[in-house]
Image (cartoon, rainbow, N blue to C red):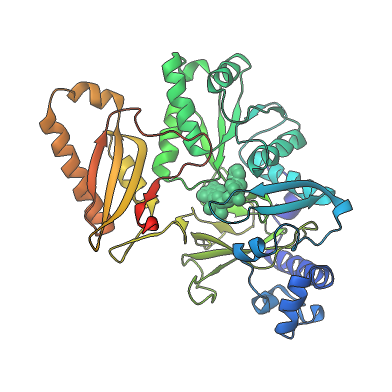
Amino acid sequence: MIWNENKECMSREDMRALQGKRLHKIVTYVYHNVPFYRKKLQERDIRPDDIQSIDDIVRLPFTTKQDLRDNYPFGLQAAPQSEIVRIHASSGTTGNPTIVGYTRKDIGVWSECMSRCLTAYGVSRNDTFSVAYGYGLFTGGLGAHYGVENIGAAVLPASIGNTEKHLHLIRDLGVSGIACTPSYALYLAETMKRMGITKEQIRLRVGAFGAEPWTEEMRREIEDKLGLKAYNLYGLSEIMGPCVSYECPRQQGSHINEDHFFPEIVDPETLEPVDAGTVGELVFTTLTKEGMPILRYRTRDLCSILPGTCSCGRTSLRMGHIMGRTDDMLIIRGINVFPSQVESVVLSMKEFAPRYLLVVDRIGNLDTLQVQVELRQEYFDENFDTIATFQELEKRLADRLKSVLSLTAKVNLKSPGTLARSLGKDSHVIDHRKQY
Ligand code: DLL
């Protein structure tokens, strides 16, 4: 099923024309309402009427997270405060949080885009759908919630925490869909096992997972443990929240809601557009947003735009899996390492649970990488008495990591259940070098 055929299946030509028209309008709007953008455009000697087609986007300035922080709290807001009906704030580890205000129309666009995602996952008004992203300043909970209501399904606003009660409800109410982070999905599966609830006793059919990077291996793990089909859901608060892109049943990339969020992929160093299919930094321009429109926002997410069209009938561009973030990338002894590379290796080996932590340090002048990884309960129980088996396993993992990362990592096996669990976004890295 397709929620909005008119937009999701529009011809490429019509879509580009629509994007061009909307870009002109949004540039005019920010020029007159956001001094930050007016100044930037004037510095480049650009008047709104110079921007007539979507190809003109390359003339516009980029916006960064730092710009948002520097203009905290409302410097980039274009709509008057009286038009703002919701404010979200994204947490950052350093500096001011990012504040994003939404008008009533923005909330409508958000629900519309989220409805497209849910419909692509096969969710309908006949479903009971649990939203287990955090409700509150984070966009996950409320963002998904409004979409579920909009398509007429029954929403269970579970939020995070209270996991055992949530699982009882999933079982007793016959909940058929769930939205949460992939790591929370695994935590649910673990808790389910502890409580003695089997996947046959629940009716979960569909999961909408995102807010953090995850791999194909992780998808299989979640599908197997919860007995559902796992779909990708991507978004970021600066642009809207969950709903920016979504997988269809073909699961070959995530369709972008391009009539609202225009994507570009650029080289993070030169900021020049990369060739089609090449991995680079994802950049979005909001084409219709009123509260806080944003031009060429550098997401720091690394991915590519997939070539070709999807056989599902949607014509919108598709982005590949997020491979990491430019600020996620560790440089260890000069070698670029993404946590997702380690995740793929760990999950390709049946001995390990999907729980790992990269600990980076500097000893003397040498960077060190330690990979802590949890053993699966069954494997641990079977081999409990044989230290040699664990040593052999440690070596096997270290060898595989070396061949993938071109870097020697020290492997540290952990007993089941010993690495910290996260209910929201999981962080897989501790970098002690930051203290030096
Ligand atoms: O995480 C919005 C969201 C909520 C998306 C629920 C999907 C589901 P932020 O907190 O602003 O917003 O974080 C945005 O999270 O730039 C990516 O690095 C990462 N991210 C979000 N979705 C995915 C995904 C929400 N499906 C940042 N795959 C983004 C990989 C994701 N990374």
Across and down, in percent, residue 302 comes to: 49, 60
Q: Residue furthest bottom?
A: 45
Q: Residue at left 79%, top 81%?
A: 47
Task: Report whether 110 appears left or right of 82.
Answer: left
**Quadrant in which the N terminus appears:** top right
Q: Residue at left 72%, top 29%?
A: 153
Across and down, in percent, residue 15 comes to: 72, 64
Q: Residue at left 29%, top 45%?
A: 371
Task: Report whether 277 appears left or right of 122.
Answer: left
On screen, residue 268 above or below 3: below
In the depicted view, which residue is nearer to us: 351 or 252? 351
Q: Residue furthest right?
A: 82
Task: Report whether 153 appears left or right of 180.
Answer: right
In the depicted view, which residue is nearer to us: 11 or 370? 370
In the depicted view, which residue is nearer to us: 419 or 399? 419
Q: Residue at left 70%, top 59%?
A: 72
Across and down, in percent, residue 414 comes to: 27, 33
Across and down, in percent, residue 405 comes to: 28, 57
**Quadrant in which the C terminus appears:** bottom left
On screen, residue 175 above or below 301: above
